[in-house]
Image (cartoon, rainbow, N blue to C red):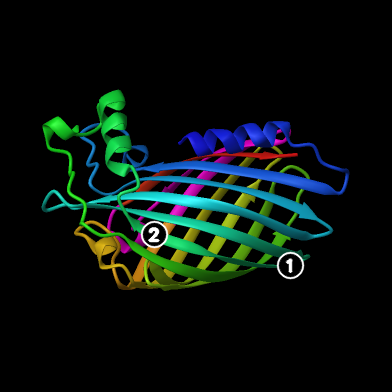
């Protein structure tokens, strides 16, 4: 979580030329954010820390980011962390966006147990280590590399106060040695005003789990998976705050709620 805060500080202090855009994105995804009231089921896909920093100039974007995911077993005391560090490249045209990403992916103990224990002590939304929080990592770590790409086509129907956007996308990822390989197709509809964006997305994905520890009971599900997502974003000046509900995250059969922060400069 410290890295997320550092990226937000960098976004606030980064200075850019007139034709350069800096974009910082940070998000917390958690089981708790997908439910309105207790009891909270904080097993399976429990929490993600996500952040990225991008720089756009002359229509070309370069940057980097990371995802740190905590997965806990629903049937015993096993757990596993997934860590991805990626470089990002993007190019946009009027109705088409292409992007690529690549970097190392890891599995093992990367502090998820301690951070989840601290979160549960602070929030009271789950068991602590003294109360039975899943604590057992496998003895070894997995190390691999991933490469992926995304193509997105969108069409805007603009109005004076309210606009609509329809979009379709295909995302592919190949992982070797660790992580997850996948192919996903999605269709998205958005309603847009000056300060508010609402969106709904339907997706179908084929998932192959390269690191078997990521397929703990409650973790990633393999094969064909269907999902839907819905969210809202509030924009003001160069900042945005959003919430998204993500059903059947990663084929796990359970949802995650996402609270996100974004700045442009």
Task: Identify the residue at horizontal 37%, vertical 67% (top origin).
Answer: 178
Q: Quadrant of the C terminus?
A: top right
Report the disc number at residue 106: 2
Left or right: 85 as drawn, with respect to 97: left
Say which element carries label 2: strand
Q: Give the mark nearest the N terminus, 1 or 2.
A: 1
Q: What x and y, as percent, mark residue 170?
A: 55, 72
Front-most of 90 and 183? Answer: 90
Residue 261 visible: yes
- Whether residue 240 appears in magenta in the rendering, the answer is yes
Magenta stretch prevailing secondary structure: strand
Mark 1 neighbour class, 10 Å CA radius: few under 14, some 14 to 19, many 20 or more: few
- Whether residue 265 appears in magenta in the rendering, the answer is no
The magenta span reads 229-254
Q: What x and y, as percent, mark residue 176?
A: 41, 74
Residue furthest to the top in view is 122
Front-most of 207 and 235? Answer: 207
Q: Quadrant of the N terminus?
A: top left
Task: Identify the residue at horizontal 25%, vertical 60% (top origin).
Answer: 140
Residue 235 visible: no
Q: What x and y, as percent, mark residue 146?
A: 48, 69
Say which element carries label 1: loop
Residue furthest to the front in view is 140
Q: What x and y, as percent, mark residue 155?
A: 70, 64
Count of marks, rendered view: 2
Distance between the Cα atoms at labels 1 and 2?
35 Å
Q: Quadrant of residue 249?
A: bottom left
Q: Quadrant of residue 34?
A: top left
Which residue was labeled with disc 1?
95
Task: Identify the residue at horizontal 13%, vertical 48% (top origin).
Answer: 77
């Amino acid at each position: 979580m410290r890295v997320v805060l550092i990226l937000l500080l960098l976004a606030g202090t980064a200075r850019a030329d007139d034709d350069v855009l800096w974009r910082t994105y940070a998000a917390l995804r958690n089981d708790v954010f997908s439910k309105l009231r207790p009891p909270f089921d904080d097993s399976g896909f429990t929490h993600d820390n996500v952040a990225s920093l991008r720089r756009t100039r002359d229509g070309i974007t370069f940057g980097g980011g990371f995802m740190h995911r905590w997965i806990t077993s629903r049937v015993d005391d096993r757990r596993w962390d997934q860590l991805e560090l990626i470089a990002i490249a993007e190019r946009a045209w009027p109705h088409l966006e292409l992007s690529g990403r690549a970097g190392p992916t890891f599995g093992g103990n990367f502090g998820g147990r301690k951070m989840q224990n601290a979160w549960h002590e602070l929030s009271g939304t789950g068991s602590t280590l003294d109360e039975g929080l899943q604590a057992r990592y496998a003895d070894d770590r997995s190390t691999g590399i991933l490469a992926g790409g995304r193509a997105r086509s969108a069409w805007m129907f603009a109005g004076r106060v309210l606009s609509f956007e329809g979009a379709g996308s295909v995302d592919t990822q190949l992982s070797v040695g660790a992580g997850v390989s996948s192919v996903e197709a999605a269709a998205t509809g958005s309603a847009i005003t000056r300060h508010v964006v609402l969106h709904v997305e339907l997706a179908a994905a084929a998932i192959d789990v390269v690191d078997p520890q990521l397929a703990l009971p409650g973790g990633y599900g393999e094969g064909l998976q269907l999902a839907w997502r819905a969210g809202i974003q509030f924009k003001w000046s160069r900042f945005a705050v959003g919430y998204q509900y993500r059903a059947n995250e990663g084929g796990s059969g359970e949802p995650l709620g996402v609270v996100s922060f974004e700045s442009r400069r």
